[in-house]
Amino acid sequence: MSGQPIDVGLPPDQVTGIVLAGGASRRMGRNKALLPIEGMSLIERTVQALGKVSGRVILSTNAPDSYPFLGLECVPDLYVGQGPMAGLHAALKSSQSTWNMVAACDMPHIHERFLRGLLDLANKQHIADAVIPVVDGRVHPLLAAYRKETAEGLERRLIKGQLRMVEWVQELDAVFVHEEQLEAMTGLDPRRILFNMNTPGEYEAAGGLLNSDFPEER
C-alpha cells in the first residue's frame, strides 16, 4: 500500500528532531537504545529517520557517555528524575524551531514517511500546539510533533510533580490523528510504527537477538 502523496510543507531546516533516550530499560535488562535490529542500533535507526525530516537532531539524555558515536548534541534534563516529560521539556527548551519532531528511541519500525505525515499536518495547523497519533484509542505522545512553546506547560507540571504525559497532552490544543487517517496518509500500519520494545520478548518479536555480540556501549 503506497498511501496518498504527502505534501511536506515544513522543510527540514525549520524542524528540530528530538530523540528521547532517558529510559532506564529495567524490564529489558540492558540499554535498549543500543540493541541491534538488522545491523543498526535502535537509537541509530531513530536518528536516521529524524535526520531525514529535520535540519537538527538533538539527543535528550542524562547519559551522554553512552552515545558519543552518534555525534549529536546531548541535552540533559533540567528536572532530573522526572521521566520522559523532563526529557521532552529540556529538549524543547534547547530547540530553536517552531515545530519539533519527537521520537522515543525504542520503536524498531520508525519510518521517515510516518514522520513526514505528522509534520505535514503540523504545517497545516496555524494554532495547534501538537500533532499526536492515536491508535486503538491510546494516545502516543512519544512519537509526535510539538511546538516549542509547549515547554511552558511542561515546566508548570514538572514543578508540581504532575508527571503523566497523557494528562498534559489533553491540556494542549492538539490535533489527535487516528489510525485510519495515519494509514491513509502514509501507507504504513500505525500499530507497527508505534510498537515500542520494553522486554526481551518484545525485542525478539521485532526481529532482534538478545544473545548477539553487539556491545552494550561503544
Image (tube, rainbow, N blue to C red):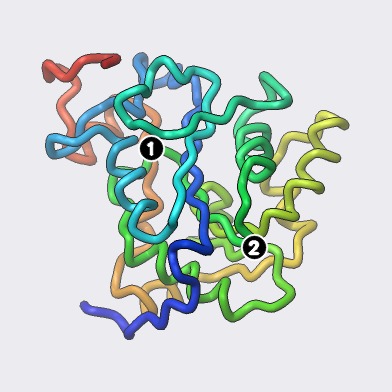
Helix, strand or loop for disc 1: loop
- Where is residue 166? Give x, y as percent: 68, 48
| Amino acid beneath label 2 | Ala
The residue that appears at 53% across and 33% down in the rendered structure is 60
Residue 207 shows up from this direction = yes
Residue pointed to by mark 2: 130
Q: Position of residue 194 (x, y in %)?
A: 40, 52
Instruction: Indicate the position of residue 29 as horizontal and vertical percent values.
Output: 36, 14
SS at mark 2?
A: strand
Residue at x-position 26% and y-position 27%? 35
Which dot marks residue 106? 1
Side of 81 relative to 48 (left or right): right
Picture disc at residue 197:
none
Kindly identify the residue that appears in the image at 70 percent across and 64 percent down: 129
User: Disc 1 marks which amino acid?
Assistant: Asp
Q: Quadrant of residue 212?
A: top left
Above or below residue 161? Residue 107 is: below
Distance of label 2 from label 1 (alpha carbons): 21 Å
Among numbered discs 2 and 1, the one appearing first in the sequence = 1
User: In the rendered view, would you say 179 is above or below 81?
Assistant: below
> Percent x, y for residue 180?
43, 76
